[in-house]
Image: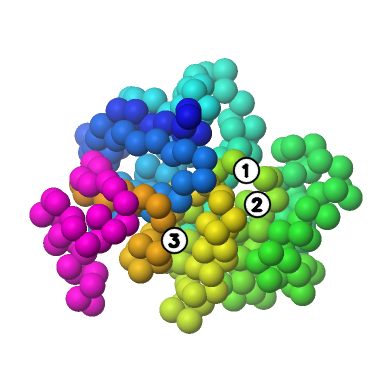
């Protein structure tokens, strides 16, 4: 089976600073891949490269076998297939919740407004936010904003969802409500790549864990292998710090 996403020999430099070095991994349909590692290890940069928010220095990213780094790629159309949920929500403050979830289907996918509204309502219901459709983002809690951001990403019906530390900007009491939504998506068989510091969540929801250290993939495998029998010293040290908090 051909992977949905295939990343090969990916490298990213910012000036003389190498952030990613020779990254190789693939994502198959139905995979939930959690990327863990210390701050500064390159996790978010990797996700931003996959979503083409950053241009890789070298290497390749293939979506269904086709390179997305080719100059002929339709970037908005690609991003509609590989959606992203940001740690800082990135909602439009001048639009209400419903409008935030309708704009991409209407503007990018050219979905008729009535259909876009029905689709937005369906996904807002999925994340428990239908009673807030007329609210502006500034009146929502962090957890509510992130649930709207997830509904907005779902409204373009992507094949893959990328989550960049979706709970890092939330108060501790709001983390659970967002993780519950993502967990439900995993149970539905959604294909997801999640950068997270929530180790218990990553262990429970993923079928594969990637541990990054200083811009490289240090160790990769099933959750039980990475969390219970890590091989590399860097993985062991990182997990020990987390479990001993």
Percent across and percent down for residue 29 are: 52, 40
Give the crowd class for mark 1: few <14, some 14-19, many >=20 residues within 10 Å: some
- 23 sits left or right of 87 in the view: left
**Residue 20 placement: quadrant:** top left
Percent across and percent down for residue 95 are: 74, 60
**First in sequence: mark 1 vs mark 3:** 1
Marker count (numbered)? 3
The magenta stretch spans residue 132: no
**Residue 83 placement: quadrant:** top right
Percent across and percent down for residue 196 are: 38, 59
Furthest residue in direction right, as rendered: 114
- Residue sitting nearer the eye, 15 or 11: 11
Q: Secondary structure at mark 2?
A: helix
**First in sequence: mark 3 vs mark 2:** 2
Q: Is residue 72 above or below residue 32?
A: above
Q: CA distance from mark 1 to mark 3?
A: 19 Å
The magenta stretch spans residue 234: yes
Q: Which mark is residue 205?
A: 3
Percent across and percent down for residue 235 are: 18, 56
Q: Which residue is mark 1?
A: 158
For the point 43% across and 79% down, the residue is 172
Do residues under tags 2 and 1 come within 8 Å of each other at their CB atoms? yes
- 128 sits left or right of 182 in the view: right
Q: Which residue is mark 2?
A: 154
- Residue sitting nearer the eye, 59 or 53: 59
Q: Nearer the viewer, mark 3 or mark 2?
A: 3
Q: CA distance from mark 2 to mark 1?
A: 7 Å
- Residue sitting nearer the eye, 161 or 215: 161
Q: Secondary structure at mark 3?
A: helix
* Residue numbers of the magenta segment: 216-245
Q: Is residue 144 above or below residue 222?
A: below
């Amino acid at each position: 089976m051909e992977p949905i996403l295939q990343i090969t020999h990916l490298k990213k430099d910012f000036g003389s600073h190498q952030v990613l070095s020779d990254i190789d991994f693939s994502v198959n349909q139905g995979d939930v891949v959690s990327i863990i590692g210390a701050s500064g290890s390159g996790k978010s940069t990797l996700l931003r490269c996959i979503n083409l928010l950053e241009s890789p220095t070298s290497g390749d990213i293939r979506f269904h076998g086709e390179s997305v780094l080719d100059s002929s790629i339709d970037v908005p159309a690609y991003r509609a297939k590989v959606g992203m949920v940001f740690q800082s929500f990135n909602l439009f403050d001048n639009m209400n919740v419903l409008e935030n979830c309708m704009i991409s289907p209407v503007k990018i996918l050219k979905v008729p407004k009535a259909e876009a509204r029905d689709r937005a309502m369906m996904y807002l219901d999925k994340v428990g936010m239908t009673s807030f459709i007329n609210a502006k983002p500034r009146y929502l809690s962090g957890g509510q904003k992130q649930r709207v951001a997830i509904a907005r990403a779902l409204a373009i019906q992507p094949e893959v969802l990328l989550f960049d530390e979706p709970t890092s900007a939330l108060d501790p009491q709001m983390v659970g409500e967002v993780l519950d939504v993502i967990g439900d998506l995993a149970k539905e068989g959604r294909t997801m790549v999640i950068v997270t510091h929530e180790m218990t969540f990553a262990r429970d929801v993923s079928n594969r864990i990637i541990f990054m250290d200083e811009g490289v993939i240090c160790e990769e495998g099933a959750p039980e292998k990475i969390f219970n029998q890590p091989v590399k010293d860097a993985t062991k040290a990182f997990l020990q710090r987390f479990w001993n908090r």
